Amino acid sequence: MNALLFITLAAFALLALIVIVLIKTTRLRLWQGLIIFLLPLIMANLLWFSWVAPHQLQASQREQAVNQLAKMPGYRVLQTQEPALWLLLTQELTRRIRAGEPAEKATGELRGWLIEVINQRLMRGTDAAVVNYISVSVEEMRALNQIDPGLCFRYLYPQVSGGINLLTTLPPSLNRKEADAMEQLLLNSLLPEQPLDKTQAQDDLQKIVARLYQQWGDKLQQLN
């Protein structure tokens, strides 16, 4: 930035010197010399404020957003565990910021890209990590239902309704809680999928559903 400023000032100083020499040695008038000097200055300012500065600002915002993503719980784990997915996430984040989306909104929209890997990890995670993640998800649904019952449907069926940006919809405290739960799930689901005892799983599921019906009633049908 400083080097560019120095080169620009040097170029205009040289131009001013050339104009002065032309005025003294030719029939070039003062007002004509001023036009010759000011025209490049005006064009340079137009170029700077209409293209260079906005692109530099956008590049800075993009770099800052990617660096912030690399520090966020959950996402920072994906950087090492799922490098291919991480590359797609950073590319999508870059595309959205280039399109003019605010960094927070663009980051929140990435959540839908994690559905497949989260579902895979739920099948391989430890009981504690899975239960914690599901508990936070239920807490999120309860919060969404208080805002607008329709948000629960969008949360449960993003492939149908386009999903929801949790980062801009839910309180920061709940978003942090969800991010921590996601990170714990990712960190505790690296082992191969364990063999499933279908009979025991069916019994456990019936007990869980019975408890949920006591709390949610008919609303539980949305989960079917």
Image: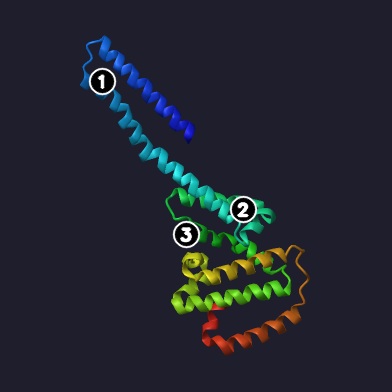
Mark sitting earlier along the chain (2/1) = 1
**Residue 170 position within the rendered picture, expressed as x and y whole percent measured from the top left:** 49, 71
Residue sitting nearer the eye, 195 or 191: 191
Mark sitting earlier along the chain (2/3) = 2
**Residue 94 position within the rendered picture, expressed as x and y whole percent measured from the top left:** 51, 49
For image coordinates 65% across by 65% down, the residue present is 183
Q: CB under 8 Å between callouts 3 and 1? A: no
Q: CB under 8 Å between callouts 2 and 1? A: no
The part of the image, by quadrant, that contains residue 37 is top left
* C-alpha span from label 2 to label 1: 56 Å
Task: Label 1, secondary structure: give it.
Answer: helix
Identify which amino acid the numbered label 1 is placed on.
Answer: Gly
Establish if 98 lies above or below 31. below
- Please name which of the two marks, 3 or 1, marks the residue nearer to the observer: 1
Establish if 122 lies above or below 223. above
Horizontal side of residue 17 vs 204, given as left or right:
left
Establish if 14 lies above or below 95. above
Report which residue position mark 3 lands on.
Answer: 105
The part of the image, by quadrant, that contains residue 198 is bottom right
The part of the image, by quadrant, that contains residue 208 is bottom right
Horizontal side of residue 177 vs 150, given as left or right:
right
Identify which amino acid the numbered label 3 is placed on.
Answer: Lys
**Residue 161 position within the rendered picture, expressed as x and y whole percent measured from the top left:** 47, 67
Q: Residues within 10 Å of mark 1 (few under 14, many from 20)?
A: some
Horizontal side of residue 14 vs 103, given as left or right:
left
Identify which amino acid the numbered label 2 is placed on.
Answer: Trp
For image coordinates 46% across by 79% down, the residue present is 146
**Residue 74 position within the rendered picture, expressed as x and y whole percent measured from the top left:** 63, 62
Report which residue position mark 2 lands on.
Answer: 86
Residue sitting nearer the eye, 12 or 66: 12
Report which residue position mark 1 lands on.
Answer: 33
* C-alpha span from label 3 to label 1: 51 Å
